[in-house]
Amino acid sequence: MLGERVEEGNQMIKGRVVLIKKNLLDLNDLGASALDRIHELFGNNISLQLISVVRPEDESSEGRLRGKLGKAAIVEDWITTITPLIVEESTYAVTFEWNEEIGIPGAFLVKNDHHSEFYLKTLTLEDVPGHGQLHFDCNSWYREEELVILRGTGSGMLQEWDRVYDYAFYNDLGNPDDDIEYARPVLGGSSEYPYPRRGRTGRPPTKSDPKTESRLPLLQSLSVYVPKDEQFGHLKLSGFLGYGLKSIGQFLVSEGEALTDTTTHDEFDTFQDVLKTYEGGLKLPQGKLLDQIQENIPFEILKALSQSDVRPYLQEFPPTSKLDFEIYGNQNSSIKPSHIEQNLDGLEIEEAIKSSRLFILDHHDSLMPYVRRINATPTKIYATRTLLFLQKDGTLKPLAIELSLPHPEGDQLGAISKVYTPAEHGVEELNTHAVIEPFVIATNRQLSVLHPIHKLLQPHFRDTMNINAFARQILIDGGGFLEQTVFPGRYAMEMSSFIYKDWVLTDQALPVDLVKRGMAIEDSNSTNGIRLTVEDYPYAVDGLEIWSAIKTWVEDYCSFYYKNDNMVQNDTELQSWWKELREEGHGDKKDEPWWPKMDSCHNLMDMCTTIIWVASALHASVNFGQYAYAGYLPNRPTLSRRLMPEPNTPEYEELKENPDNVFLKTITAQLQALIGVSLIELLSRHPSDEVYLGQRESSEWTMDSEPLKAFEKFGKKIRDIEGRIVQRNGDHNLKNRMGPVKVPYTLLYPTSEKGLTGKGIPNSVSI
């Protein structure tokens, strides 16, 4: 006890601290450990002070009471405890002096006077008078001043050891100092390019453009700033780097073989060339799902359409455009009744619309403003509309695809469109990654770690800021991997800003989303208040069960802490959190009328349910099937290099004579394909330390028994849902779940093994 004598009437409480020392991937930093021992010799220790949850000491500057501080106690035997070579948990004893004035500790204050940082996992007190054993999870310590530190000053370059959460625009994607070709617009802070905020790093501006933040060199990518508490753990980082190197190795071997190709370099000459990518050299991962997709491409495309990409059911025919007529001219659809009426099972078009059996996959308005610019590059695209018909067996049948280009003499002259019908004989970064990051920042800036909503949401923010920072550094930056491998190229992120203009937080709730897209109708007699228009819709059926489980868990948890609406309204931290989310985190949307007020238990529960859904299940449904469904390139090409050939042209004759060769020359070239497949392999993997929905890293994350029981009930519900998903996938009457290819829909199956599995719902947007 720092050499002090125990005062009369006080008791000693034994405790144990579990921590991880500073490390380099899987190895402890032995040099740092040696320096820490030297600091110990000179009396520079690690000390902890208990904070009373029942005894006030004084008031903060805002008039809030603060818990009484106990005497400092040092972490014992640091010098004599051997530091292992491999990273693992280290346990140290600590002894606190306790008296009745402290009462039950609700938090603790830690002070590190060592040379090096450490990762504090837990503190356990063995026998607290009147309570018994007491357990604190990592970072379970708080005083009012802590939030001031976490908010930072808003200036200066942030360093590796900082724990500052602050906001910035997406102004770090371009690199005009390197080449004007790599200049990119600032996303966020303007009506032209609205966008959610990211975490601030404070790097200086570029020399060429003061509005653009300078970038780190590629080899320093791992040093990109994120708050210390948001950085990957050593297991996650080691796995991420290991599989990244593996993917690079696969790419280099395959590209080396392409360089020796005796026919056409950087082209797949035959479909056998595509298969060699998976069979030769360092093999790309295989699996039952990928094998079956390779053999059954058409069905898998149709199956994908029946999952989560289909937009609203058709409400008018022909479809119309919402683009500004004065800028883009007539952009309404040119699809005519004669194109589709023979494939409607005898129904008239109006009958099919009224019975909710016509659907549209509509990418026309989102793409048309960019088509002319993208087509000026080697990549070629169309603005598209696809009509589909819901058949009696619950599957969707393609009716027509409309491909549109801007008028060659000017945008204001409208679209030039062509419609293709079947032969008679036969965007994730924005909606999950970017929109969640402001919630991570605001939660850490405005809600103390002891706040119940912080404890509820914290698992769903794990690793999000770190993976987003890595993405800005090496994936979505100007000239980065994303621009090299997908059709929008340099306009990819700019297009996501265009889409964000229509983003509405309340629409992200699954029942609301399904109704908005025409995949469900409101029905007060049905579960979740909606009835599906396509009963065999795997994403919706599984998703609604997950949504309901999350909603019940949130309601059970919040109702324990908030007994009435007044408690929500009078929670100053909660009100500051919601205000900052709206005005800062999503500042470009702050004046939108759809923002709910944080004035009731109902609104609080709805918003927390939606946040958890987006960070967990929604992200999982679009991320972890990437390699399974798009790992075989011909199934999901990422770009097109040719427009459709016109009749009576040499290109058209080539298409008739050798359609396979034309197809391979049209889709992603070999080099880009190898980069893309290697990338989605990396992004589709689960690490070994993944924490899934219904799980927590620690079973003692709160001292309150009722929330613990509610979470246990939530976990059981999630496990029961897994069983029902397996049952549905075994029902041969549900054709959209399996189909003739016998590939089950598992993207919303809650748990998973590590690796490439095509299933599993992690708690957070962590990859």
Image: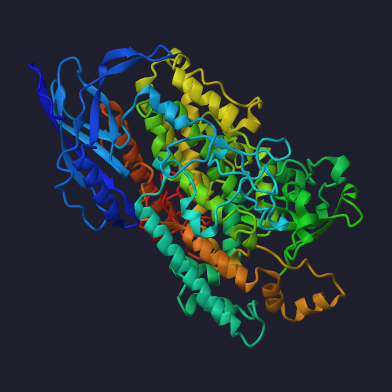
* Count of labels in the image: 0
Is 204 left or right of 569, judged from the image as shown?
A: right
- Judged from this view, the residue extending furthest toward the left is 8
The residue shown at (55%, 53%) is: 216
Q: Residue 557: where, in percent of width, then height?
A: 36, 27
Farthest residue, direction front: 42
Lateral position of residue 456 relative to residue 433, left or right: left
Give x and y (percent) for residue 340: 76, 55
Q: Residue at x 68, y 77 (%)?
A: 660
Q: Quadrant of the N terminus?
A: top left
Question: In this picture, is 606 found above or below 495?
Answer: above
Between 512 and 476, the residue placed more toward the observer is 476
Q: Residue at x 40, y 30 (%)?
A: 454
The image position of residue 433, as x and y in percent, is 53, 45
- Residue drawn at (48%, 80%) of the image: 280
Tell me if 90 is positioned left or right of 143 in this view. left
- Tell me if I can see residue 102 in this picture: yes
Q: How is the rendered protein coloured?
A: rainbow
* Closer to us: 631 or 402: 631
Residue 765 showing in the rendered view: no
Pinpoint residue 251: horizontal percent, then vertical percent: 52, 72
Please name whichever residue, 495 or 54, is drawn nearer the observer in this view of the structure. 54
Identify which residue, 165 or 288, lies in the foreground: 165
